[in-house]
Amino acid sequence: RLKMSFEARSNHARCPVAKRLFQLMAVKKSNLCIAVDLPKVGAILDLVMKIGPHICVLKTHIDVVEDFNENFVHSLVALAEKYNFLIMEDRKFADIGNTVSMQYGHGLYKISQWADLVTCHSLPGKGVLDGLKNGAVDYSNKGVFLLAEMSCRGNLINEKYTKDTMELAMDGSNNDFIAGIVCQNPHVVTNPGLIQLTPGVQISNTSDELSQQYSSPQSAIKEKGADIAVVGRGVTNSPNVAAAAEEYRDQLWSAYCSRIESED
Ligand code: UP6
């Protein structure tokens, strides 16, 4: 997987959204996902207009938005079409099927109506995925990223949990819905059709005060095996977000090119 191009890997994807994302990444030459963890819709939309040209995925935490309204998600979807990126709501679903079905399709946010991708903990087992499928109007154009590992220091995930998560992801009844895996190590994802998403990437810091741990763009792609790197505050706290997004995009894309081209 690590030496294959995104174009070639798109043929291995079982989930239609993963196939679309591989192709989008190859065409746009971007493997940058930006996390827009900001509280106001105006600031989010303003940021997205600046970073849109550089990203393959925009990652949201819709429940940190203070002035949420439906027009906001319509604007986000319009920007996703204009700049050609996918929207991932990082909800980290982790409950019984019936509950996640409601959380995904209903409530204030109606996530399934606007997010192409969502994140999900594997902790509850297969039921959480059945619940998500149930909460989507048509799950054939939706995808899930399962968390097999986390970036924060002291997290309770162990090797068995990671391995069992991969078994869940590869299960024949789910693999058309699993777009990828959130993890931190290069050996977790072996199937070339799955996309490795790796958060905890920053150029100027190695940690924050709340246990987050960072690696550099190069290390995320070449040592940790990320296909897509998630950058949050590294871009959003920058005085020039467009320039910062471009810098991360260039570094991440060169690291991917060198990974697939190198001899080792
Ligand atoms: N995230 C992590 N680590 C994980 C999973 N998800 O940091 O293991 C998410 C956070 C945040 C983003 O919820 O939205 O990735 C990282 O943001 P940062 O770059 O500002 O630390």
Image (spheres, grey):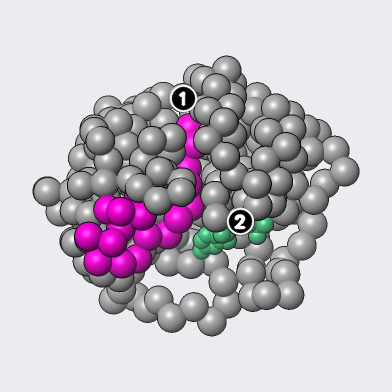
Please give the label number shown on residue 24: 1
The amino acid type of the residue labelled 2 equals Val
The amino acid type of the residue labelled 1 equals Leu
In the picture shown, does residue 227 fall above or below 138? below
Seen in the image, is 36 located left or right of residue 95? right
| Label 2 element class | helix
Farthest right residue in view: 239
Please give the label number shown on residue 59: none
Q: Which residues are magenta?
A: 84-104
Q: Residues within 10 Å of mark 1 (few under 14, many from 20)?
A: many
**Residue 95 position within the rendered picture, expressed as x and y whole percent measured from the top left:** 31, 67
Seen in the image, is 212 located left or right of residue 140? right
**Residue 114 position within the rendered picture, expressed as x and y whole percent measured from the top left:** 43, 35
At 57% from the left and 39% from the top, the residue drawn is: 69
Task: State the quadrant of the N terminus.
Answer: top left
Q: Is mark 1 within 8 Å of ligand 1?
A: no
**Residue 81 position within the rendered picture, expressed as x and y whole percent measured from the top left:** 52, 20
In the picture shown, does residue 25 fall above or below 33? above
Q: What's the CA distance linking mark 1 and mark 2?
A: 28 Å
**Does 128 lie within the magenta span?**
no
Please give the label number shown on residue 64: 2
At 57% from the left and 17% from the top, the residue drawn is: 82
At 46% from the left and 46% from the top, the residue drawn is: 109
